[in-house]
Structure formats: C-alpha cells, structure tokens
Amino acid sequence: MTEDEIRELAGYGGPLEAEFAGQRFRIRDDCLAALLTYATAGLKAEPDSDDDPTRALGALYLLLEQCLASFQAFSAAAQEAKADLDDIQAVARRVVELSCARGFWPSMRLLGFIASSLDEFDGMSLRGSGRGLTRLTAREACNLALAICLDGRDEESRQEFFDDLNYEGSPDAEALAAMRKWKAEQEAAAEAASGGDGDHLGRAGAVDVPGGGEREPAPPDSQ
C-alpha cells in the first residue's frame, strides 16, 4: 500500500497542499519538527486565548515558514489579502491536518504526546522499526503515538480514549470561557441587586465621600 492510498483511506487524499487566497501552497513532507514545536506552543496561540495576538501570529508564521515549500509566496499573498489572525490560523490548521492525516485537535494531542516524551518515543521507534523520529513523517509519528496509547487497553477504555482524542475543541479554553461567563453573570447580578449603583456603594448602605472614606447614610427625617 502506498502513502497516497493510506491518506485516501484516512480521508486526506490528494495533493499535500494548503489553499489560501485562490492559490495552493505545497506542504513539505519533512516538517515533523516544526509540527512538534507548534504543538507545544500552538495550543496557547489560539485566537481565543489570553496570549498577545502578536505572539500567536508569530507562532503561526513560524510553523508555516517551516512547513510550506514556498513560504515567501504565501507571505506575499497574505500581505496582499490583508490576512488577519483568523485567516492565518485557518491555513495553519489545514497544514496540521494534512500533514498528520487526521483532524486538527486529534493531531495536536498526538503531537503533544510525542513532544512531551520525545526521547522515549524516539527510542521506541528505533527499537520497533529501526527508524527514529528523524525518518518518520508526521502521519507515521502520530499513528505510532496512537498505537502506544492504545496498547493494553480494553474495548471500553479504547472508546473513552478515542472520545477524548477526537473531541473538537480545547477543554481548557472552554473551561476558562465558562468561568469568565459565570463571573460576568455574578457581577451583573450583584449590580442588579444593588439597584445599579454598584459603582457608588461600598459596604451595604455606605456612601462614598469625595476625597476618600465612607460615611453612614443620614437617618431619615423624623416626622
């Protein structure tokens, strides 16, 4: 079976090319090192993260510079199209998916696993086939990582693993978004309970005094 046939069966057949602004850019087949580097930093370079957008864009361009055979042409096309972070992110995702022959998040998780145990993984590859990481494509490395992770699991455990592996999205980012939403709702509820004067009230019933400090509210006029 050929590499093209395996990719076709995996649903990622055809030319190893990423499309952008009406142009197609060939993806190198020796960019595993760049993908591993991105896997350790790229999860923090998502548009929804707290990272500086400049850092996120830098991580994406570094990946593309090392993975696209004609990066200069891509860079020129991106400038001409006035590409933003989301545009570049979409190209980077496609590069990861095509290189690893699977979805973006499963690819990132398997690449992250390899990067976190690089020496051991390289040794296991050498022991099993005589081929270390330097001679593996990204697809082969991800499949080897998958085989290692599945080794010894029963059917139920395998299914749980695949559910986690194929989950579309970042659980950490979603948890952070949920926490932010909860805090915003709590703040809105607190402001509503105070009659919308939350900026002017300190402790219950106390009134801000210009120049600092608080004083108790004046007693109501006696009748």
Image (spheres, rainbow, N blue to C red):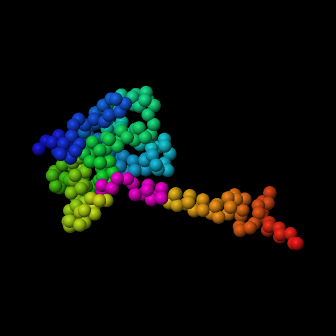
Q: Residue at x 21, y 37 (%)?
A: 14
Q: Residue at x 41, y 31 (%)?
A: 78
**Relative to residue 176, is residue 15 depicted above or below?**
above
Q: Which residues fall within the magenta stretch?
A: 165-178
Q: Does residue 170 show up magenta in the picture? A: yes
Left or right: residue 62 compared with residue 153: right
Q: In front: 174, or 95?
A: 174
Left or right: residue 189 compared with residue 113: right
Left or right: residue 109 compared with residue 125: right
Q: In front: 153, or 63?
A: 153
Look at the image and tell me whether residue 63 can be seen.
Answer: no
**Relative to residue 160, is residue 112 depicted above or below?**
above
Q: Does residue 155 show up magenta in the picture? A: no
Q: Residue at x 34, y 29 (%)?
A: 22
Q: Position of residue 158 (x, y in %)?
A: 23, 63
Q: Position of residue 150 (x, y in %)?
A: 22, 61
**Relative to residue 128, is residue 7 depicted above or below?**
above
Direction left: furthest residue: 1
Q: Position of residue 144 (x, y in %)?
A: 21, 53
Q: Residue 81 lies in what quarter of the image?
A: top left
